[in-house]
Image (cartoon, rainbow, N blue to C red):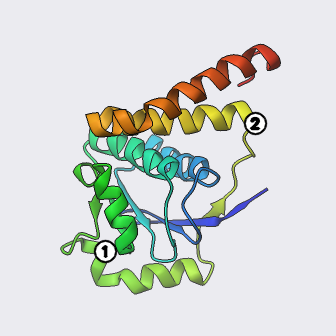
Amino acid sequence: MADTSLKYHEFEDGIWIRCNSRGCFMNSPALKGIAEKYLERGGTHVVVDLELCPGVDSTFMGTLAGLARRCVGTGGSMEVAGATERTREAMEGLGLDMLIEIDPPEAPWRKDLEERRAVLSRGETQGAANDDPLSEIQRTRHVLEAHNTLRSMNSRNDAAFGYVCETLQEDLMRHGKDYGEEG
């Protein structure tokens, strides 16, 4: 089933991923998949457009942080465009602004921001996210990975998400026995 909450297009200077709904644990695996495929092909610049996104959850933010680390680790960068004030505050509160430029005023894409958005709105995209649905175990692993990324960023996040990660890890151990460690 295609995830229509995310659309993307590769421009000369990088990939533009637009989130058309709430950024959450349901669409963050698709975000990760789109960006990772681009990075595996040698791409270096990822922009996530949140203009139409009313908010983000911790899994989505942890996914952004993991992708940003990967971008930075290969000499690239990640930026967020169009974050609401609430989303900006949430991202900054977890320290994502140390990895991700949030609405950078001097970004080269600012000169054609509306044209980029129009390309995606007109359907001139390279696609909507089309990942296969994740199994319960795969989704739990994804949520755990996102929260472990947030935990590793600073001690405040470690304290805030420690219990969540412990609970998810216990779920994985319990379900692994029930389902034979499916991938």
Say which amino acid is labelled 2.
Ser
The mark found on residue 21 in the picture is: none
Task: Assess disc 1: are there few (<14), some (14-19) or many (≥20) residues with their C-alpha within 10 Å of its C-alpha.
Answer: some
* Image location of residue 35, percent across then percent down: 49, 50
| Residue 73, quarter of picture | top left
Q: Position of residue 102 (x, y in %)?
A: 29, 64
Q: Secondary structure at mark 1?
A: helix
- What residue would you read off at disc 2? 135
Q: Earlier in the sequence, mark 1 or mark 2?
A: 1
Residue at 66% in and 23% down: 172
Q: Residue at x 28, y 83 (%)?
A: 111
User: Left or right: where does residue 129 sit relative to residue 91?
Assistant: right
Mark 1 or 2, closer to the camera: 2
Give the image quarter of residue 171.
Answer: top right
Looking at the image, the residue that sits furthest to the left is: 106
SS type, badge 2: loop
Image height of 86 relative to 117, above or below = above
- Nearer to us in this view, 177 or 158: 158
Depicted 179 relative to depicted 61: above or below: above
Residue at point 67%, 33% (across, down): 138
Q: Position of residue 21 (x, y in %)?
A: 59, 70
Which residue lies under the disc numbered 1? Answer: 109
Quadrant for the C terminus, please. top right
Whole-angstrom CA distance, mark 1 to mark 2, is: 37 Å
- In the image, is 138 to the left or to the right of 55? right
Crowd rating for badge 2 (residues with CA inside 10 Å; few <14, some 14–19, many 20+): few
Using residue 156 as the reference point, say whether residue 34 is left or right of it.
Answer: right
In the drawing, does residue 76 fall left or right of residue 26?
left
Q: Are marks 1 and 2 in contact (CB under 8 Å)?
A: no
